[in-house]
Image: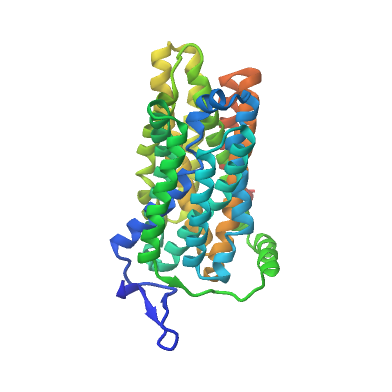
Amino acid sequence: MASIQNTNISSGIVLAPHAATHLPAPLVLLLASGAGLAVATLYYSQPMLGVLGASIDASNRAIGLVPTLTQLGYALGILLLAPLGDRYDRRKIILAKGAVLIAALLLAASASGIKGLLLASLVIGLAATLAQDIVPAAATLAPEAHRGKVVGTVMTGVLLGILLSRVISGFVADHFGWRIMFAGAAASIALIWLAIWRGLPKFKPTTELAYTALLGSLGDLWKRHGALRRAAWAQGLISIGFSAFWSTLAIMLHGAPFHLGSAAAGAFGLAGAAGALAAPVAGRIADRRGPELVTRLGAALTALAFSTMALSPLLGAHAQLWLLIACAIGFDLGVQATLIAHQTLVYSIEPAARSRLNAVLFVGMFIGMAAGAVLGSLLFAQWGWMAVTALATTSALAALAVRLWPELKRAN
């Protein structure tokens, strides 16, 4: 750790510098694992919704609020809590949120009714934002020339957490029950909490703004930086389709003609995981060719993958499953590449405001995720899977339009 730490002799505290010459691989692995396990807690419930509803005697409409509240809690946590990373030691914030997340997961595991589960879901979303304290920490520790690569590596952990969480929860719910899944998630966060407590250096605050002024500065950053606005809008739009797909997939596969259980729905995360592994590659391309190119390629790939799902009615059940798998690989790769490029872009705007810039970007993203969960469920209930496909395709095309807008303006 000596290569990434500065010691304040008078106080005896170890601080992370603003720029590092080398970031040890074990620390990168710790950051990626911590971010991945934290963000995974947002998605464990999705493949288990059918099992959850039957177990606690909740309607489909009520149980559909579980992922919605989790996503909204995450968006609120990013807005209200993530900016604190610029004002206080990020290590302390990560540890505090980790403790709350453990308690919330245990509350979910012991919930006897829908009210307790919904409360736990909201708190899980709020506390899981420790992942969005870890990512700016990685950007701060990384050397500038390799920031995209390091952020991409840490985000691989985040994205694998998002995708593999569905695989794990589907399997565990089918074989051991949903309560065991939430309890196991609490244990995983407890283990990573101990590792972070031992291995993560302290961070020096970059601002002395009071809390209200800190939150107020989010609006100022939004007004001053068009690049930030475009990134938040584009990532939010592309997230609508992403969330709509994953929020309705388990219910769609449960019905005709598939009649598949939670484990099958969760296994689709393996397809998306293939795309997540390309995140460091996207970071390297952003370092070399610029993040703007990567955002456009990612949005275009996402739109293409979602639109291809419209071919499903022309195929048999077996072929439909293979088409869904191929599309999941495609759109997950597109969404993740776009996110890495957006993060690389916004972190370069104001280094002293990285937590707040990250907060604005991810508030946009998770508002899109929450909107996608709600709209996807409503559209699926009213018009079926093709309506979800249309929503996802339209939102991805809108994201591409946002990324192309500066080019179109210059052309005119």
Work out whether 364 lies above or below 61.
Answer: below
Q: Is residue 399 left or right of residue 193?
A: right
Q: Which image quadrant is residue 171 in?
A: top left
State the image coordinates of residue 164 (x, y, percent, origin top left).
39, 38
Rendered residue at 42%/55% (across/down): 286
- The mark total stands at 0
Residue 158 visible? The answer is no
Location of residue 325 with respect to 223 vertically, above or below: above
The residue sitting at the bottom extreme is 10
Q: Please tell me which residue lies in front, 66 or 240.
A: 66
Displayed quadrant of residue 264: top left
Residue 65 lies, with reference to residue 250, above or below; the image says below
Give the residue at x 35% y 49%: 281
- Identify the residue at horizontal 33%, vertical 56% (top origin): 29
Q: In x, y percent, where is residue 154?
A: 39, 54
Q: Which residue is drawn at 52% across and 36% down?
A: 242
Q: Where is residue 331 in the image (x, y as percent from the top left)?
A: 46, 35
* Residue 374 seen in this snapshot: yes
Q: Quadrant of the N terminus?
A: bottom left
Colouring scheme, one of rainbow, by chain, secondary structure, one colour: rainbow
Q: At which x and y percent is residue 232?
A: 60, 51
Q: Is residue 128 left or right of residue 65?
A: left
